[in-house]
Amino acid sequence: MDKPLLASGFVVLSHVVPSLLIDLKYCYEDNLLGRLLAGYAPDGVVVVTTECAQALGQITLQNEPFRDTYFNFEVAKYEP
């Protein structure tokens, strides 16, 4: 039996809210430093609690008329 990749209660955000545009600046060279930041994978994904993903999904649905507007969510990287 394969071990789950994520702990219970956590999801990959793009799997739950596929319409959400996610920009992980420190996973690429297009950021303040001009280089990939140590500790960030170049193919990084956003992992959040299920509750957070559902809330962001509701925000995107409620703001459908503003489809071309950017909403900036600052999320800190968690390191156990």
Image (spheres, rainbow, N blue to C red):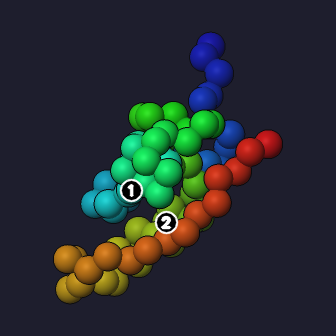
Question: What amino acid does circle 1 point to?
Answer: Asp
Under circle 1, the secondary element is loop
- Identify which residue is drawn at 43% across, 47% down: 34
Q: Are marks 2 and 1 in contact (CB under 8 Å)?
A: no
Viewer-side residue, 64 vs 34:
34
The answer to whether 21 appears left or right of 75 in the picture is left
Which residue position is annotated with label 1?
Answer: 23
Work out whether 18 lies above or below 74. above
**Residue 22 at what x, y percent from top left?**
38, 57
The answer to whether 28 appears left or right of 54 in the picture is left
**Residue 73 at what x, y percent from top left?**
49, 71
User: How many numbered dots are placed on residues in this image?
Assistant: 2
Question: What amino acid does circle 2 point to?
Answer: Gln
Position of the N terminus, as image quadrant, is: top right
Work out whether 58 lies above or below 26. below
Q: How many neighbours does mark 1 have within 10 angstroms: few (below 14), some (14-19), or many (20 or more)?
A: few
Which residue position is annotated with label 2?
Answer: 54
- Identify which residue is drawn at 33% across, 62% down: 20
Name the quadrant containing residue 59. Answer: bottom left
